[in-house]
């Protein structure tokens, strides 16, 4: 599976594959134009334009079956990585020690904070994964409780418009309640 994915990314080729998603657990044939492999801290996925949905998406590599390179088909201009807005958009995150945790100075030392903050620049397409992996409280009022929330995203609006922001602990779009149906 990995060999044709890497070749498609490197040479700018399309790929036909069988894929199983959480939304459609039956195997589907997908035509994708992959551009990058990404490790989320838990699993690998490939960032690709999906012809079926007509947008860029993340495909979990372990769910890809029987990939076949389409050597005679190159991606259309709108399927190239420079058109992937979530990939090209950089978000700046300002993380601080969670206000409700004891000993913020220890958290600041653990994360190498300068002036009590850790500033990160990430691709929007990876932000939700990183915030989840690091258990960052993304509520506007630092309301998540528990020892796993040692960090707080000072400005939750920093991830507004990030498609995978729903992965970030406690995040909800402005004007929505956490856990509300979209």
Image (cartoon, grey):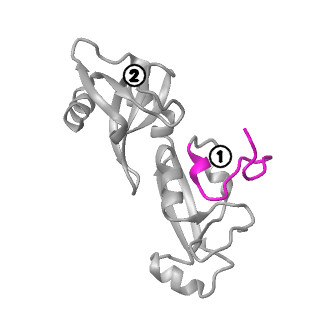
Q: Secondary structure at mark 2?
A: strand
| Residue linked to disc 1 | 160
Q: Which mark is residue 30?
A: 2
* Relative horizontal placement of residue 176, taking residue 171 as reference (left or right): right
Whether residue 126 is in magenta: the answer is: no
Q: Is residue 11 above or below residue 45?
A: above
x, y percent for residue 62:
33, 41
Q: Is residue 16 above or below residue 147?
A: above
x, y percent for residue 160:
65, 46
Q: Are marks 2 and 1 in contact (CB under 8 Å)?
A: no
Residue toward you, 59 or 171:
59
Q: Which residues are magenta?
A: 164-182
Location of the C terminus (image quadrant): top right
Label 1 environment density (alpha carbons within 10 Å; few <14, some 14–19, many ≥20): some
* Relative horizontal placement of residue 180, taking residue 76 as reference (left or right): right
* Relative horizontal placement of residue 50, taking residue 3 as reference (left or right): right
């Amino acid at each position: 599976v990995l060999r044709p994915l890497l070749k498609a990314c490197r040479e700018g080729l399309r790929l036909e594959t069988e894929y199983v998603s959480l939304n459609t657990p039956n195997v589907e044939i997908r035509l994708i134009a992959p551009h990058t492999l990404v490790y989320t801290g838990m699993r690998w996925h490939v960032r690709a334009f999906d012809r079926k949905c007509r947008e860029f998406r993340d495909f979990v590599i372990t769910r890809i079956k029987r990939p076949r390179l389409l050597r005679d088909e190159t991606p259309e201009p709108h399927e190239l990585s420079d058109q992937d807005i979530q990939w090209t958009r950089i978000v700046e995150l300002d993380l601080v020690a969670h206000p409700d945790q004891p000993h913020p100075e220890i958290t600041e030392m653990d994360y190498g904070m300068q002036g009590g903050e850790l500033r990160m620049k990430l691709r929007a397409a990876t932000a939700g994964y990183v915030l989840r992996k690091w258990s960052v409280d993304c509520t506007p009022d630092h309301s998540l409780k528990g020892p796993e929330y040692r960090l707080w995203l000072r400005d939750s609006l920093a991830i507004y418009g990030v498609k995978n922001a729903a992965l970030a602990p406690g995040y909800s779009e402005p004007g929505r309640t956490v856990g509300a149906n979209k």
